[in-house]
Structures are given as C-alpha cells and as structure tokens.
Image: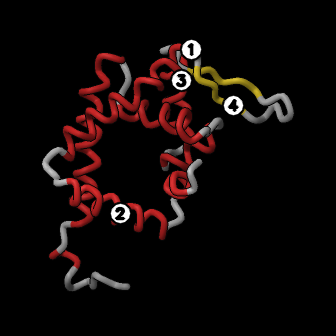
Amino acid sequence: MAHFTPETFNESFLGMLLGRTEQLKNRILDKHLEPHDVTAQQFKVLVIISRFNADTPAELCRSLSLDSGSMTRMLDRLEQKGLLVRTRCDSDRRQVRLVLTEPGQALSDLLPHVGAAAMNEMVGVLEDSELATLEKILTKILVASADSITLARLAGK
C-alpha cells in the first residue's frame, strides 16, 4: 500500500521521527551504560551475541547493518575491554567465532536491567496500550521486511 507520493512526501515527518527516536534511544542507553564502560553500539553487539546466539562477525554485520570494517573496530574494542574473544572455527579456519568472556557474560546478565531502565525512561510517557500498539506496528513493519532478529524473536529463539 502506497502511503506517500512525491507530492505528499514532504508533509510527513515519519522518517525523521524514526531516526530521531533511534538517536534518543542511543543517548539514553549511553547514559545508563556509562558506569559499565560500554556504549549503546557495544550494548547492541552484546545483546545480539547473548540473546540471539550470533557467533560470527558476519551475523552481527547483517543484524546491525554495519560494514565489516566498522564491525572489526567494534569487536576490537570489546575484546580490549575483555568482554569477548575471537577464536578460529575448528572445522573452517577462515571462520571467526565470537565468545563472551566471563566478564562479558556477567555484563550481558545485567543488560536486561540496564535496557529496562533505559527503555522505561524513553517510553515512560506512553500508556500501556500506546506502547503495545507501537510495538505491534514496528513489529509488523519489520516482519514485512523479513528482519531476521524480529523473526527469530517471534519464533521464540
């Protein structure tokens, strides 16, 4: 269904609102993660590894829409912080596997608490029904685009 035309496109702020909301979420997460010396972007990597069992840089690149160079730098920082290690796959030495270290796993165990506090700060202005509707709408958009993380969440993985 086409909701926009070239003539009406400038009347909508949807794209700007979605982008600004993502920026707000990252700022709030950064604030909540500061005591843990982790950024919102690093938080996302740890969440994808711990909650969605991504264990290769390629999976993370696809999930987070990052290029391999950016992902390499991100993984370098997380490895320097002692939160993960990269190992070669025994069956294919070209493959790199990502494994959370003990401190990385301990931080991952805290992520739901940090994430909940940050999300409550962000969406605290919404009524329960509004929040449920927002989540339903965003899920519908992501399912229609075959977003792997959303589909995995819905499949209970």
In percent of the image, x 22 and y 54: which residue is there? 128
Left or right of 92, for residue 42:
left
Q: Is the residue marked by circle 1 packed among few (<14), some (14-19), or many (20+) residues within 10 Å?
A: few
- Amino acid carrying label 1: it is Glu
Of pointers 2 and 4, the one earlier in the residue sequence: 4
Cα distance in 3D space between marks 4 and 1 = 16 Å
Of pointers 1 and 2, the one earlier in the residue sequence: 1
Rendered view: 48 above or below 88: below
The numbered mark at residue 136 is: 2
Q: Is the residue marked by circle 3 packed among few (<14), some (14-19), or many (20+) residues within 10 Å?
A: some
Rendered view: 58 above or below 135: above
Left or right of 138, for residue 16:
left
The numbered mark at residue 97 is: 4
- Amino acid carrying label 3: it is Asp
Rendered view: 112 above or below 135: above
Cα distance in 3D space between marks 1 and 3 = 17 Å
**Secondary element at tag 1:** helix
Q: Nearer the viewer, mark 1 or mark 2?
A: 2
The numbered mark at residue 34 is: none
The numbered mark at residue 102 is: 1
